[in-house]
Image (cartoon, rainbow, N blue to C red):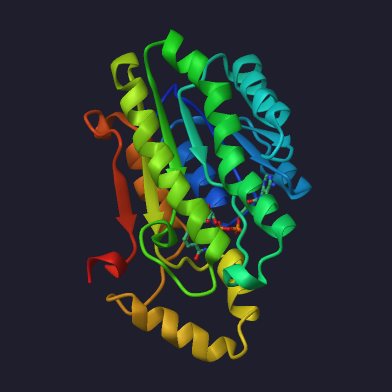
Amino acid sequence: MSEVKPLDGRVAIVTGAAGGVGRATVDLLTRRGASVVAEDVDAAVAGLEGPKVATVAGDVRRAETARKSVETALSRFGRLDILVNNAAVIITKDILATEEDEWNDLMAVNVTGVFHHCRAVLPHMIAQKRGSIVNVSSISGLVGLPLQAAYCASKGAIVQLTRQLAVDYAASGVRVNSVAPGSIDTPFLARYLESQPDPAAAEREIKAAHPMGRYCGPEEIAEPIAFLASDASSFITGAILSADGGYVAR
Ligand SMILES: NC(=O)c1ccc[n+]([C@@H]2O[C@H](COP(=O)([O-])OP(=O)(O)OC[C@H]3O[C@@H](n4cnc5c(N)ncnc54)[C@H](O)[C@@H]3O)[C@@H](O)[C@H]2O)c1
């Protein structure tokens, strides 16, 4: 007898799917039984294509990318249950060094991208009276961190949009939650470390800031995402789930 998996028959969209957390999430959701539309601006996302994975190359800043992912979910897999808003970029500058264009561009990816994708999926989720949206925020959305003016502001916006949407759509059967990761071993973190004057010292400092004394692998963020996407979290909405080795606990 074949094993029943928690996400059997479910269909998800994952943005930023070519990156560290995105790829791990696509992998875990499919192993748990879901079919996934993997979306990324990086054309390398096409490499994830498979029987349970459709891919969409597009920019989250554009509403039409979100619409294309929804159409792909419906045409290829026949339904849509889960949205994981994961794509993001970081600028490591204080506010005085941040140019207006840089600010606007980061906000367009990290915040407006989430806006477009929520707007594209919600009508379907409301109509079927079921859905789960998981927004990837950050410790940077919960505490102030040096040289992350635009990034902290964007992740704080995701935290509040999560709570706001949870309230608006709870009665419609749509749950909206967020995973707030600490530092994750992905290309994103590697780029951040490279931008520091002394990358090795920055790495030691980051690890020491996490009470567990390490950063995590992308699969350790995919797990809480999959939990919030599944019925195992059926009474949870508006939650910001810290997955940060204790970072914000102290
Ligand atoms: N890595 C960390 O230390 C860390 C810590 C806390 C939170 N996060 C969050 O985790 C999430 C995933 O980050 P990651 O570490 O996997 O990063 P990553 O850089 O490995 O992956 C991000 C992906 O987003 C895609 N992307 C960027 N701009 C895009 C756009 N305009 N349109 C579509 N796709 C776009 C990139 O191509 C990339 O594949 C992000 O929301 C990030 O803010 C990361």
Q: In the rendering, at what x and y percent does residue 186 appear?
A: 56, 65
In the picture shown, does residue 187 fall above or below 172?
A: below
Q: From the image, which quarter does the N terminus lie in?
A: top left
Displayed-image quarter of ligand 1: bottom right
**Residue at coordinates 49% horizontally, 20% vertically from top-left?**
122
Q: Quadrant of residue 59?
A: top right
Q: Quadrant of residue 46?
A: top right
Nearest the eye: 8 or 179:
179
Query: Is 153 on the left or on the right of 238, as rendered?
Result: right
Q: In the rendering, at what x and y percent does residue 52 appear?
A: 58, 31
Could you tell me how many numbered marks the image carries? 0
Nearest the eye: 2 or 17:
17
Q: In the rendering, at what x and y percent does residue 91 appear?
A: 63, 65
Nearest the eye: 156 or 211:
156
Is any atom of residue 36 visible in this view? no
Q: From the image, which quarter does the C terminus lie in?
A: bottom left
Q: In the rendering, at what x and y percent does residue 144 appear?
A: 41, 67
Query: Is 144 on the left or on the right of 122, as rendered?
Result: left
**Residue at coordinates 51% horizontally, 68% vertically from top-left?**
185
Nearest the eye: 128 or 139:
139
